[in-house]
Image (cartoon, rainbow, N blue to C red):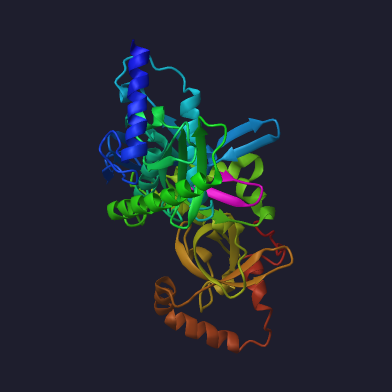
C-alpha cells in the first residue's frame, strides 16, 4: 500500500511541474528558496558562518594552522601534501533521525570532496597566505542541496577567518523532470528540494565564481542527458549562482583584513638554501635555541622557506628577525646596534646580529686614546657600531659611532686629557703603528705577542 501511495505522489509531483510549472513548495521552476547568511557566529573559532537556504542549514567552521600541519597523503604514486581540507558531516539529527554516528560514509566523503574542489581554486598560495586551512561543514538541517550550501558556507567562513580568497564561490543544484513518454518535454528546476531530488531525473550540482565554474557533478537516472538540457541547466545555474553571490557579498563584502586573534600568527621568511645549515646549527642547536627563547614553532623546507608560527605576534617577529639576522651578510659602511659580548685588552667584541660578532679595536672605541677598554664599554652594554671591513676570513672589523650618548660623555669627561694626549703624541719623533697599540699596550717588551682573535 505504501509503495502504491508513494508512486501516486511521485506521479502527481511530476505532472504538476511538467504541466502547471508548479513545485511542491509553491515555487516557480527558476525560484530560489529564501537565503539567510550569517558570519562570526561562534566566538572562539578562527572563522565561522551559517548558510541557510529554505530548510537546509549548514554551519561552516574554519581552523587555521601552521604549514607544518599540512595533511600528508601516501598514495600509489607517492606522497603529497594538502594544505586546504574540507570535511563534511551529515549527522542523523539533520533529517530527524536518532541513531548512532559512525565513521563518515561514502556520501559524506563525496560531498566533502566536491565542496573542497569547488573552493580550492580561490585559495591563496602559500606565499600569499602561509597557513594550513581546514573547513568543517556541519549539516544542521537537510532539505536538499546540502553540498552546495556547504560551498556557500565555506566561502563565508573563509572570508570571516581573514583568508584572502581570490573570489567568493557559490553553489546551486539544478534538477530535471522529463516526460517519460515524450522525451522532448522537460522542465529544469533551480535549487531542488528533497522531494524534487528524490522524484526527479537529474541532480546537477554546479559551483563557481562570477567568472566561471570551479566544480560540477551530475547524478542522473537517465541513460543520457541531451545537450540541449545541459545547456539550459548550466545557464540557469549561472543565473542562480550570481544571485547567491550577491547575497554572500551583502553579508560580508570582502575577507577580513587580518586573521582572528585566536588564530596562530605565521610569518614566512625566504632564505638562501645554502644558509639552511646556519639556521639549524650543529645538531639543531641554533634553531632549538630560537624556539626555546621565543616560543615560536619553526619549519624549514629544502627550498629555503622558513615558516614561523605562534599565537604571539611578538614571538613570531622576534624569531623572524633572529633568522634574518643569521643569514644576513653585513656590508662595510652599514651601521648596527649591538651588544658587547666580550672584552679583551685590545678591544671589545660586539654582537651586531644573532651569532655574528665583530671586533671594535681599542683604537676605534672613542675619539681619544683609550688606556683601558672597560673605561668605555661594559659587557652587556648596547652600543652603536659601523662595519669598517670584512677580512679574508670573514671576520668583522667594527668602529664605534662616536656621536652616541656614551661616546659624547666620555669625550666631555676626558676632553683635557684628550688634548694633552694629542699634543704629547704630536711631539713624538718615534710614531709607531697606531693599530699596534691594542696589541702592546700594558705589556712588557718581553711579552708583546699578538693575541688571537676571538673567533
Near-viewer residue (127 or 4): 4
- In the image, the segment drawn in magenta is 299-308
The residue furthest front is 181
Q: Quick check: 95 above or below 23?
A: above
Q: Is residue 117 visible?
A: no
Number of marks in the image? 0
- Position of residue 195 measured from the top left corner of the image (x, y, whole percent): 35, 29
Q: Residue at x 28, y 55 (%)?
A: 250
Q: Residue at x 39, y 74 (%)?
A: 409
Q: Is residue 37 visible?
A: yes
- Position of residue 378 measured from the top left corner of the image (x, y, whole percent): 47, 60
Residue 112 located within the stretch drawn in magenta: no
Q: Quick check: 368 above or below 1?
A: below
The residue furthest top is 1
Q: Quadrant of the N terminus?
A: top left
- Position of residue 339 measured from the top left corner of the image (x, y, whole percent): 49, 60
Q: Residue at x 69, y 60 (%)?
A: 451
Q: Quadrant of the C terminus?
A: bottom right
Near-viewer residue (212 or 69): 212
Q: Is residue 153 left or right of residue 449?
A: left
Dominant secondary structure, magenta: strand
Q: In which quarter of the view is residue 77 placed?
A: top right
Amino acid at each position: 500500500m505504501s509503495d502504491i501511495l508513494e508512486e501516486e505522489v511521485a506521479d502527481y509531483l511530476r505532472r504538476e511541474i511538467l504541466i502547471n510549472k508548479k513545485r511542491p513548495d509553491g515555487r516557480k521552476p527558476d525560484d530560489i528558496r529564501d537565503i539567510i547568511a550569517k558570519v562570526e557566529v561562534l566566538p572562539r573559532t578562527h572563522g565561522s558562518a551559517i548558510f541557510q537556504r529554505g530548510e537546509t542549514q549548514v554551519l561552516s567552521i574554519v581552523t587555521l594552522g601552521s604549514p607544518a600541519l599540512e595533511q600528508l597523503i601516501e598514495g600509489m604514486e607517492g606522497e603529497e601534501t594538502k594544505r586546504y581540507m574540507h570535511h563534511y558531516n551529515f549527522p542523523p539529527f539533520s533529517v530527524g533521525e536518532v541513531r548512532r554516528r559512525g565513521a563518515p560514509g561514502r556520501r559524506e566523503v563525496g560531498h566533502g570532496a566536491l565542496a573542497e574542489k569547488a573552493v580550492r581554486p580561490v585559495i591563496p598560495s602559500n606565499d600569499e597566505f602561509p597557513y594550513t586551512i581546514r573547513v568543517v561543514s556541519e549539516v544542521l538541517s537537510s532539505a536538499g542541496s546540502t553540498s552546495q550550501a556547504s560551498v556557500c558556507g565555506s566561502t563565508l567562513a573563509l572570508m570571516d577567518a581573514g583568508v584572502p580568497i581570490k573570489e567568493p564561490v557559490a553553489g546551486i543544484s539544478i534538477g530535471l523532470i522529463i516526460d517519460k513518454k515524450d522525451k522532448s518535454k522537460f522542465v529544469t528546476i533551480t535549487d531542488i528540494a528533497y522531494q524534487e531530488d528524490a522524484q526527479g531525473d537529474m541532480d546537477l550540482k554546479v559551483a563557481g565564481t562570477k567568472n566561471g565554474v570551479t566544480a560540477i557533478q551530475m547524478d542522473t537516472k537517465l541513460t543520457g542527458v541531451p545537450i540541449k538540457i545541459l545547456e539550459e541547466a548550466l545557464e540557469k545555474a549561472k543565473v542562480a549562482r550570481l544571485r547567491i553571490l550577491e547575497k554572500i557579498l551583502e553579508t560580508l563584502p570582502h575577507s577580513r583584513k587580518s586573521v582572528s586573534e585566536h588564530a596562530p600568527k605565521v610569518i614566512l621568511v625566504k632564505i638562501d638554501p645554502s644558509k639552511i645549515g646556519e639556521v639549524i646549527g650543529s645538531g639543531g642547536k641554533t634553531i632549538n635555541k630560537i624556539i626555546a627563547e621565543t616560543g615560536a614553532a619553526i619549519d624549514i623546507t629544502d627550498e629555503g622557506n622558513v615558516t614561523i608560527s605562534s599565537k604571539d605576534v611578538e614571538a613570531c617577529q622576534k624569531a623572524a628577525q633572529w633568522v634574518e639576522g643569521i643569514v644576513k651578510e653585513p656590508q662595510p659602511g652599514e651601521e648596527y646596534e649591538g651588544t658587547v659580548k666580550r672584552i679583551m685588552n685590545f678591544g671589545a667584541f660586539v654582537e651586531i646580529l644573532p651569532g655574528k660578532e665583530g671586533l671594535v679595536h681599542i683604537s676605534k672605541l672613542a675619539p681619544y686614546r683609550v688606556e683601558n677598554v672597560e673605561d668605555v664599554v661594559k659587557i652587556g652594554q648596547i652600543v652603536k657600531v659601523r662595519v669598517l671591513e670584512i677580512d679574508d676570513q670573514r671576520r668583522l672589523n667594527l668602529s664605534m659611532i662616536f656621536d652616541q650618548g656614551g661616546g659624547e660623555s666620555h669625550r666631555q669627561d676626558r676632553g683635557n686629557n684628550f688634548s694633552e694626549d694629542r699634543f704629547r703624541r704630536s711631539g713624538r719623533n718615534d710614531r709607531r703603528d697606531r693599530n699596534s697599540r691594542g696589541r702592546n699596550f700594558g705589556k712588557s717588551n718581553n711579552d708583546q705577542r699578538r693575541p688571537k682573535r676571538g673567533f
